[in-house]
């Protein structure tokens, strides 16, 4: 089973994915996380001023280049990897091409790696939790391609692989703006080159709203979780557990050994 999270930047997708995985494991389920963690989040308990003083801002920017490069090398070395994942990724990007060539290239590479991870997850008999995946990528294509045409977006959703369970993370706009501003202030200049600016990150809120409405119009069920505090997380995870129980009542989930 694949669980996919989506939501605007700064909403806490990674935090919720980790908490959900821990809760499900505590209930005896076998769970694996597929994370797209930002390099700067590798040491979350270090104060921003200490990070800058230690040079981690520079290393975070370097990691933004190194990790995708190594992942692509691993894909290319796989005998089973011909061009299927790359073709699928390029098809999605061609359908709604970002106006920036750099972002077009970056999304193509990201979707190629994501397609490979998704293929492996589909063959697994554990619960696979993606902190973000194809729905998030579609929202980025809508933003960077400057096109929210419903018919075109529906075609993108038709081509993208489907998760078994969709979870949309949400928070008030002022909370997201504060979180994104704090994140930006903690970054070095080089790392900011790999990020969208604050205005475009906030523009994703409306795009995510419209994308969720389209998903529901198409008959998809989306569990909406507020990420304001611990209590909100607990309530959201309880709803996810209920939905998992309903989906798997006929075929119980494999219990971790």
Image (tube, helix red, strand yellow):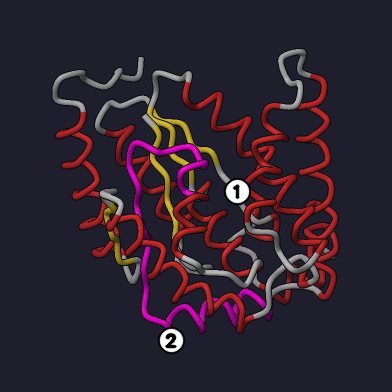
User: Mark 1 vs mark 2: which is more N-terminal?
Assistant: 1
Q: Image check: 199 left or right of 53?
A: left
Q: Which residue is depicted at the point 22% across and 36% down?
A: 244
> Is residue 52 placed above or below 28 in the rendered structure?
below
Who is closer to the viewer here, 44 or 250? 250
Towards the viewer: 248 or 203 = 203
- Position in image of residue 159 (x %, y %): 52, 41
The range drawn in magenta is 157-185
Residue under circle 2?
A: 174
Magenta segment: does it hold 182? Answer: yes
**What kind of element bears circle 1?**
loop
Residue designated by label 1 = 36
Label 2 secondary element: helix
Which residue ends up furthest to the front in the rendered image? Answer: 151
Circle 1 Cα neighbour tier, 10 Å, few/some/many (<14 / 14–19 / ≥20): some
Please give left or right for residue 148 compared with residue 189 in the image: left
Residue drawn at x 45%, y 20% as measured from the top left:
124
């Amino acid at each position: 089973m694949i669980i996919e999270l989506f939501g605007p930047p700064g909403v806490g997708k990674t935090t919720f994915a980790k908490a959900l995985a821990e809760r499900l494991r505590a209930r005896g389920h076998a769970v694996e996380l597929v994370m797209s963690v930002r390099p700067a989040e590798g040491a979350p308990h270090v104060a921003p001023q200490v990070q800058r003083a230690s040079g981690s801002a520079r290393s975070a920017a370097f990691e933004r280049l190194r990790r995708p490069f190594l992942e692509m090398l691993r894909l290319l070395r796989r005998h089973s990897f011909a061009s299927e994942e790359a073709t699928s990724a390029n098809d999605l990007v061609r359908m709604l091409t970002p106006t920036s060539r750099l972002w077009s290239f970056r999304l193509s590479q990201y979707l190629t790696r994501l397609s490979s991870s998704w293929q492996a997850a589909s063959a697994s008999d554990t619960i696979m939790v993606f902190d973000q995946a194809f729905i998030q990528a579609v929202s980025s294509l809508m933003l960077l391609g400057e096109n929210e045409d419903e018919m075109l977006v529906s075609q993108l959703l038709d081509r993208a692989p489907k998760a078994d369970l969709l979870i949309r993370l949400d928070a008030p706009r002022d909370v997201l703006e504060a979180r994104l501003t704090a994140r930006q202030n903690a970054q070095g200049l080089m790392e900011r080159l790999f990020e969208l600016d604050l205005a475009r990150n906030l523009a994703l809120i409306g795009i995510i709203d419209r994308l969720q409405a389209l998903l529901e119009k198409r008959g998809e069920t989306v569990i909406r979780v507020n990420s304001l505090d611990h209590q909100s997380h607990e309530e959201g995870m309880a709803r996810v557990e209920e939905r998992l129980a309903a989906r798997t009542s006929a075929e119980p989930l494999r219990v971790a050994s």
